[in-house]
Amino acid sequence: MILSAFAKALAQVGDPRFRRVVILGIALTLALLFAVYAVVLLAVSWLTGDVVTLPLVGEVRWLDDLLSWSSLIAMMVMSIFLMVPVASAITGLFLDDVAAAVEARHYPDLPPIPRMPWMETIRDTLRFLGVLIGANLLAMILYIALPFGSFAIFWGLNGYLLGREYFQMAAMRRLGRAGAQELRRRHWLRVWGAGVLMTVPLSVPLLNLMIPVLGAATFTHLVHALRRDRGRTG
């Protein structure tokens, strides 16, 4: 069921509505990362100033430059791990567009539904973004402690978080929040598996730019497949 849903999503990758979401997601992700780095750089400059007096050393004028370059390197390393969850969370802002494109092509008999209110979408996205970033920052401790298991930890953690959130957002469109939670709890292992399938390619540069959109489409198909199964089983 998961592979079938992913194959259908992959077959629709040329849809102009998919490309629009990809471009918007990349642009907003890069803007956010640059904004975070600008804030870090300003904080470093404000804390260190042009001249710093160190015990036994005296006045040091190059410390702010060193810290600025160090913060750039640290930000580049962190972005390797953070760009994935940030891009995935931001793509969640436009999941409604992806789901609508999927339903228009594959489920044309479904009645149209109104878009989720923007404030509710933004609230859910910010909450999800905070959880993703917080969990991945904490996981960096495990990446350092268990370097050989870092990819497995990354895939398992983000697979669970992304699967949970994307499935919830896709299911809420047709079932409401309570109905989506009930369906997700009933099929939590399958949702986690689909989330891992979505997360593994996120580790591959360039390919990861399309994965959040493909993931949103995949979970839309998965929600409809599970709804059909539930209907057949009563």
Image (spheres, helix red, strand yellow):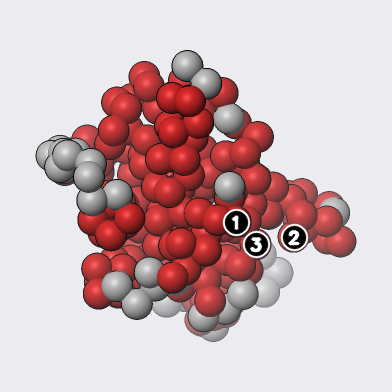
Circle 3: element type:
helix
Would you say 192 lies left or right of 208 here?
A: right
The image shows residue 22, relative to residue 61, as above or below, that is above
Kind of residue at badge 3 = Val
> Seen from this angle, which residue lies furthest top?
234
Q: First in sequence, mark 2 or 1: give its number.
A: 1
Kind of residue at badge 2 = Phe
Q: Are marks 3 and 2 in contact (CB under 8 Å)?
A: no
Which marked residue is nearer to the observer: mark 2 or mark 1? 1
Residue 36 spot, x, y in % from top left:
39, 63
Residue 43 spot, x, y in % from top left:
40, 62
Nearer to the camera, 107 or 158 = 107
Kind of residue at badge 1 = Leu
Q: Are marks 3 and 1 in contact (CB under 8 Å)?
A: no
Would you say 130 lies left or right of 114 here?
A: right
Which residue in the protein does label 3 denote? 200
Residue 69 spot, x, y in % from top left:
54, 80
Q: Separation of disc 3 and disc 2 at Cα?
A: 9 Å
| Rendered image: mark on residue 3 | 1
Circle 1: element type:
helix
Whether residue 67 is visible, yes or no, is no
Q: Are marks 2 and 1 in contact (CB under 8 Å)?
A: no
Which residue in the protein does label 2 denote? 151
Which marked residue is nearer to the observer: mark 3 or mark 1? 1
Nearer to the camera, 144 or 100 = 100
Q: First in sequence, mark 3 or 1: give its number.
A: 1
Within 10 Å of disc 2 (Cα), the crowding (few <14, some 14-19, many 20+) is some
Identified at 52% across, 21% down, the residue is 233
Circle 2: element type:
helix
Q: First in sequence, mark 3 or 2: give its number.
A: 2
Identified at 23% across, 56% down, the residue is 104
Residue 21, by quadrant, is bottom left
